[in-house]
Image: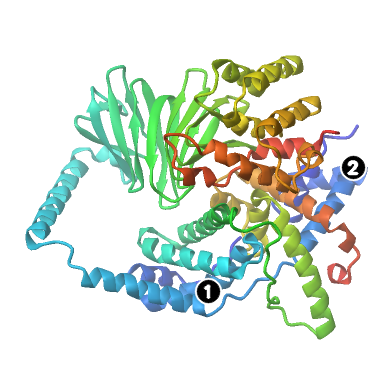
Amino acid sequence: MLSQHVSKNAAAYCHGELSSEESKQFAEHIMSCATCRAEFEEIKLGIKLAEQLPEIQAPNHIWTNIESRLKQDHAVTRSSPRFSRPTYAAIAAVLLLSISMAVFWLYRDHTALNGQPFWQVVNLTGSPTIGSSGIGTNGRLAVGQWLETDGNSRAQIAVGSIGHVDIDPNTRVRLLETQPTEHRLELAEGKLSARIWAPPRLFFVDTPSAVAADLGCAYTLEVDKTGASLLRVTSGWVELQLKDRESMVPAGAACETRPGIGPGTPYFEDCAGEFKSALEKVDFESDAQTRSQSLTLMLQQSRPRDTLTLWHLLARVDGDDRVRVFERIASFVPPPQGVTREGILQLDREMLDRWRLVLESSWSNHTLLPKEVGKAYWQVKNGVDQRMKNPATK
Amino acid sequence: MAEQLIEGGVIEACQRGDREAFRVLFETYKDKVFSIAVYSSGGDRSIAEDVTQQIFLKLFTAIQQFRGEAEFTTWLYRLVVNACLDERRKRRRLLSWGDVLPMSGPINKKPQEKSYARMEVAEAVRVAIEELKPKFRIPILLKYIEGLSYEEIAKAMGCSKGTVASRLNRGHGQLAKRLSHLRNHEVLND
């Protein structure tokens, strides 16, 4: 009897990334499994092709541009006396005070820091704790430590120099990492509100059912006792991910996640209640009939703005359901030239994206949302990947 | 594993603001960074130049924060990944599909006929790579242009090693499907 198929390890095997035991099992399996052997040959071809990619020589003027930019920045700094003498004195005083306070706190609470990087925490109300100690008016959250708030407490965390996170009552968060390349919190339970002004993908929040990756934004994220979460984006974009399942959520929209499943489909929060309830079933129910009936309700309740959700669903439903979704979207906004019904039903990536670009104008028309935010690139990768393995027939 | 391309003292000198040391850093990594930027931007060299410039400017302003070369390389590749993804998002509206500028030839210097054949295959691969989704394209570029291990790619992309293995497997599979007609090409069977 054949052991479990191993074709998913083919690239790792070729690249020497498997352990000795795994490599041995792989080699033994493909000797006796024609399916895996055929896929292995495909991967080998793919590797030979990728090896043909040449390195491309960068043009010399890139350094010239960089150098002149650095000189400009340096010249601006030197030639712009922005502050008056009294202001310099004030800054110096603040710095001296800050250094003194830093030294004081360092020696006062050395065991909490223990040489680890940390984030500053401000007590907004009540008695937040770090570890088992109350933080008073200020605290420091070191890597590995938990910050907890009770029913009467709130706190604010400074995320390095790239933003801040407000912690609501009854919340537990832990600092997992703080480096120039990555700042990561764990939200075990409760609610936080983040405001990040860094380049995308520097700030992450791990929850039991997805990882939220900031793409330059403001949002709230809430985790309940079951590990399910609700993300609400107020500015910019947030990506939710669990393994290969991803959703990109724009401002004005929300997205739910479930443990073991990951992120659902984004929806605008001003949608009809029945639409939202039905979406929950489509996203997280396993029974096909329930999902299909819920989809019927969604289509009945949908508005032009809800094409945000419907567009995502194209890749998350199949067969007749996909046809119905297509027809509903088309009734609001016909596919543009070059985008065909057949192409969309086959989940042609280019056609999906072209139609999305046209649909975005109805997604950007939100009172809280600057129009340019709606133009950001995003897609629902998990649905497209899975459905492309089994494209629907017409 | 990524090759140790620079001596340890170069990072420290950069951290002290030594412009010449930064020039050494730039010269060491510029072709790799530029290559990934070109392949990520559909062959558009002007975009790739902008992206490369941004990456090194960011690197110069933040290099004081690093404690050793291992962190530096992880951060550099993370910068490259994010910069390429962000540029693609920004220009997705402006750059219509198929709007790809022709690339200049690769660096390899081979006898003329062989060189042409290699360029032919390389161009076909480049186009096929461009058609991959970013999550499949970027690990392939990091593997073959930067020479990173799966663990290093995982750190650069902010995902697990298992995810990297899965994406590389699928990316290679898609490449093979799109370019199956090159299976018996002389260049691949040297």
Q: Amino acid at mark 1?
A: Thr
Q: Is residue B133 visible?
A: yes
Q: Is residue A19 visible?
A: no
Residue nearest the observer in this picture, A354 or A136: A354
Identify the residue under disc 1.
Answer: B28
| In the image: residue A114, left or right of residue B29 | left
Colour convention: rainbow
| In the image: residue A48, left or right of residue B41 | right
Residue A70 x/y as whole percent: 36, 72
**Residue at 55%, 32% in the rendered image:** A210
Residue located farthest toward the bottom when viewing the structure as drawn: B111
**Which quadrant does the C terminus of chain A fall into?**
top right
Q: Are marks 2 and 1 in contact (CB under 8 Å)?
A: no
**Label 1 SS:** helix
Q: Chain of mark 1?
A: B
Q: Are marks 2 and 1 on the same chain?
A: no
**Residue at 65%, 71% in the rendered image:** A55
Q: Chain of mark 2?
A: A
Q: Which mark is residue A35?
A: 2
Q: Quadrant of residue A14?
A: bottom right
Q: Quadrant of residue A235?
A: top left
Residue nearest the observer in this picture, A212 or B45: B45
Image mark count: 2
Residue B124 vs B18, above or below: the answer is: above
Q: Quadrant of residue B61?
A: bottom left
Q: Residues within 10 Å of mark 1 (few under 14, many from 20)?
A: few
Q: Amino acid at mark 2?
A: Thr
Residue B176 x/y as whole percent: 82, 55
